[in-house]
Amino acid sequence: MLRIAVPNKGSLSGPAAEMLHEAGYQQRRESKELRIVDPENEVEFFYLRPRDIAIYVSSGRLDIGITGRDLLVDSGADAEEILALGFARSTFRYATKPGTVHTLADLHGRTVATSYEGIVGKHLKDNGIDASVVHLDGAVETAIELGVAEVIADVVETGTSLRNAGLEVFGDPIMKSEAVVIRRTNGAEGADENVETKVQQFLRRLQGVLVARTYVMMDYDCRVEQLEKAVALTPGLESPTVSPLHNEGWVAVRAMVPAKEAQRIMDDLYDIGARAILTTAIHACRL
């Protein structure tokens, strides 16, 4: 039985449950459920506080987990990222009052307030910056006004809350985060063969969901003499499927194309004479 940690609340919880459902796994029906068993897939899910997931996984009590890259780094746990999931993206930046700090080097001797002291402490150390880090649980924007720190480090999305607090970002991003699948560092070494098989199956399923969300299936008809131009527009993953039509000189083509480029590709195909062009969603796949 594969044991998986899943976020029980917050911005990671809903999208993680949705992705797992798309991947064919049972999910809890009530938010109060802390554990469910999916016997058909031989998986046991544990719904845990997102900040604690890396600790549980690093202990070896759970095989893998879904959490944020930021929470993994901040925890300092002996766990590693094995698959990025593409949701819950965020960027960490330094911010302060305009005109006071301009570069990372200016942080020497200063105090930085943050809810992610593990991330910030590591970033400062990696860059040789001698600064103090103060841990606050949320609302770090007020730390400068109240004299607790001279600089803050926090998640920045639109920057509106920082501007409202009279602050501005400076320097390069500390890190960019998103939801990730994690496992104990070097966890594959010496792992039970059945567990490792289930881990790889789990990863393939999630990768299939990621591809299904990114691509659409495109079908169209074109004349044989235009086939090479058409295939250049829709090369597919390996190559497109080409089948002869009843009308001589025409073929039907099927290929996976990036969803965000589908409309442009349809226009280009039409311009070279392709017809009956249509796209369909992909609900699941294996590559």
Image: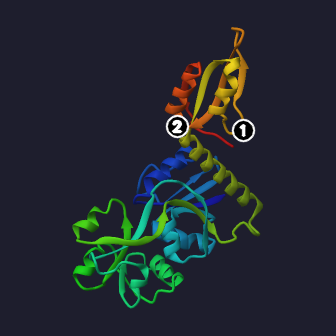
Q: Quadrant of residue 100?
A: bottom left
Q: Secondary structure at mark 1?
A: loop
Label 1: few (<14), some (14–19) or many (≥20) C-alpha neighbours in 10 Å: few
Label 2: few (<14), some (14–19) or many (≥20) C-alpha neighbours in 10 Å: few
Q: Position of residue 34 (x, y in %)?
A: 47, 60
Residue sitting nearer the eye, 76 or 7: 76
Q: Position of residue 35 (x, y in %)?
A: 51, 59
Q: Quadrant of residue 197?
A: bottom right
As drawn, the label of residue 12 is: none
Q: Please report the residue visible at 64 percent of the width from the left and 70 percent of the height from the top.
A: 184
Residue sitting nearer the eye, 183 or 124: 124
Amino acid residing under circle 2: Glu
Amino acid residing under circle 1: Glu
Q: Please report the residue visible at 49 percent of the width from the left and 31 percent of the height from the top.
A: 263
- Identify whether 129 is placed above or below 142: below
Foreground tag (2 vs 1): 2
Residue sitting nearer the eye, 15 or 219: 219
Q: The N terminus is located in which quarter?
A: bottom right
Q: Which residue position is annotated with label 2? A: 261
As drawn, the label of residue 238 is: 1
Q: Is residue 124 visible?
A: yes
On the rendered structure, is 139 left or right of 284?
left
Residue sitting nearer the eye, 198 or 205: 205
Label pair 2/1, CB-CB below 8 angstroms: no
Q: Quadrant of residue 32?
A: bottom left
Q: Please report the residue visible at 56 percent of the width from the left and 76 percent of the height from the top.
A: 77
Mark 2 vs mark 1, CA separation in Å: 18 Å
